[in-house]
Each structure stands twice: as C-alpha cells, then as structure tokens.
Image: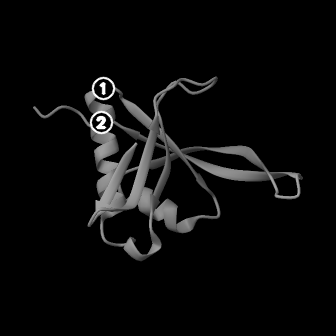
Amino acid sequence: MLVADRNGFPVGQAWMDFRPEPGRVVPKVWAVRVLPECRGSGIGSRLMRELERCAWRKGCVELQLFVEKSNAQARRFYERLGWRIIGERSDSYSYVTPAGVRERVPQELWVFAKFRPPAPA
C-alpha cells in the first residue's frame, strides 16, 4: 500500500495485491483513490508510477486492474498512463445494510494490463 501525504494528512492511496488467485497469476492493482479536492494535481499518476516501479523491481512483467465500464474518467486516467484494455469481466460484490439485508451489486468491468517496459539498451 502506498499513501500520498500532504502536510501530514493522507490525500491518496494505492494498493497492489501480489497474492495469486484462481485465474489470475499477475499482481492486481486496486483501491487507487485520491481525495476529490486533490484530483488533477498529479497525485494519482505518481502513486501509479511508484506501484509500477515496485512491481518491476520485484520481477513482475505484467500488472492488471479492473475498471467499471461506467467510469469513463478512470478509463481515460489509466489509458493516459499507458494501460491498455485486454478484456472484459462480469463480477459482483455484496454488503450488508444496517438493517441486516445482504445486497448484491453486479459489475461490468474492463480488464486493463500494463507490461514491464524493455530494459534500456
């Protein structure tokens, strides 16, 4: 987990999960967040570049992340950073309301990937 700090206050975070899962053998980037009032200042881009550097140093050759198809702003952000769509995925998550009712939320996702750049000659 990386945290962006501004004057002693956390303004952004990014997580990378290196644990393998069925059907996924590459690290997954998730929970990339920047406070709304700090967006557009480069914090998210710096967090992503540092996550990538960490993965490349560990010997990873590919990273993946998922973006909800309805989130055009996130799609543009990742594409601007060199990530490319390699597929689609249907998923869901669930939560329990304060009244004790389990709610299921379906998701339609873009699967993004980024590959380690070649070593300089």
Q: Look at the numbered disc 2 and give the secondary structure of its residue.
A: helix
Quadrant, the N terminus: top left
Task: Please state the horizontal and vertical placement of residue 103, each as a whole percent of the image.
Answer: 84, 53
State left or right for residue 8 relative to residue 98: left
Report the front residue among 8 and 78.
Answer: 8
Q: Residues within 10 Å of mark 2 (few under 14, many from 20)?
A: few
- Seen at 45% across and 44% down, the residue is 15
Badge number at residue 121: none
- Seen at 43% across and 62% down, the residue is 77
Q: Residues within 10 Å of mark 1 (few under 14, many from 20)?
A: few
Disc 1, disc 2: CB below 8 Å? yes
Badge number at residue 58: 1
Task: Please state the horizontal and vertical placement of residue 81, each as a whole percent of the image.
Answer: 35, 55
Q: Is residue 106 visible?
A: yes
Q: Is residue 116 visible?
A: no
Which kind of residue does numbered mark 2 sit on?
A: Cys
Report the front residue among 97 and 119.
Answer: 97
- Seen at 48% across and 28% down, the residue is 26
State left or right for residue 105 relative to residue 76: right
Dividing the picture into quarters, in which one does residue 79 lie? bottom left
Report the front residue among 66 and 37.
Answer: 37
Dividing the picture into quarters, in which one does residue 4 lie? bottom left
The residue carrying mark 2 is 54
Q: Look at the numbered disc 1 and give the secondary structure of its residue.
A: loop
Q: Residue lying furthest bottom in this view?
A: 37
Which kind of residue does numbered mark 1 sit on?
A: Lys
Quadrant, the C terminus: top left
Task: Please state the horizontal and vertical placement of residue 3, each as a whole percent of the image.
Answer: 36, 52
Q: CA distance from mark 1 to mark 2?
A: 6 Å
Callout count: 2
